[in-house]
Image (spheres, helix red, strand yellow):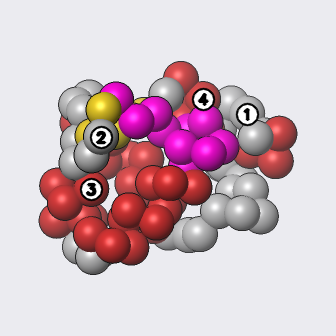
Amino acid sequence: MREPAPWMQMPIDDRILEALATSGLVLSPSVIAFNIDKSRSEVNRRLSELVDHGFVKRVKRGYYAITEVGEQYLDGDLDPDDF
């Protein structure tokens, strides 16, 4: 079982990471928001935080992908407090 870091907001952070991981695609905040039933502005705020902590990378303006660190977090293979 994975443990979220204190800076993470649940369940939205997990849902964003899961959407990126399961799709295997580079996605926009609008597409992520639509698929996890959240607002685009809420997803945008959380993506910024996930990028700052290395769980997601900004591929180009407005497009995001999960990183290896994000994948390891989802797999429960790292301590998110380290990021």
- Locate residue 31 relative to residue 12 in the image: left or right: left
Q: Is residue 56 magenta?
A: yes
In the picture, the disc for residue 78 is 1
Within the image, what quadrant is residue 64 found in?
top left
Q: Is residue 58 above or below residue 4?
A: above
Residues under numbered marks 2 and 4 in contact, where contact means CB atoms less than 8 Å apart: no
- Residue 21: percent from left, percent from top: 36, 36
Provide the residue designation for mark 4.
Answer: 69
Mark 4 and mark 3: span between their CA atoms? 20 Å
Q: Residue at x 65, y 43 (%)?
A: 53
Q: Nearer the viewer, mark 3 or mark 1?
A: 3
Mark 2 and mark 4: span between their CA atoms? 21 Å
Mark 4 and mark 1: span between their CA atoms? 8 Å
Give, as a three-letter code, the residue at label 1: Leu
Residues under numbered marks 3 and 2 in contact, where contact means CB atoms less than 8 Å apart: no
- Residue 68: percent from left, percent from top: 53, 23
Residues under numbered marks 4 and 1 in contact, where contact means CB atoms less than 8 Å apart: yes
- Residue 58: percent from left, percent from top: 40, 36
Sequence-first disc among 2 and 4 = 2
**Residue range highlighted in magenta:** 50-59
Within the image, what quadrant is residue 3 found in?
bottom right
- Locate residue 9 relative to residue 23 in the image: left or right: right
Provide the residue designation for mark 3.
Answer: 29
Give, as a three-letter code, the residue at label 2: Arg
Q: Please identify the quadrant where the C terminus is shown.
A: top right
In the picture, the disc for residue 61 is 2
Mark 2 and mark 1: span between their CA atoms? 28 Å
Sequence-first disc among 4 and 3 = 3
- Locate residue 28 relative to residue 41 in the image: left or right: left
- Locate residue 22 relative to residue 55 in the image: left or right: left
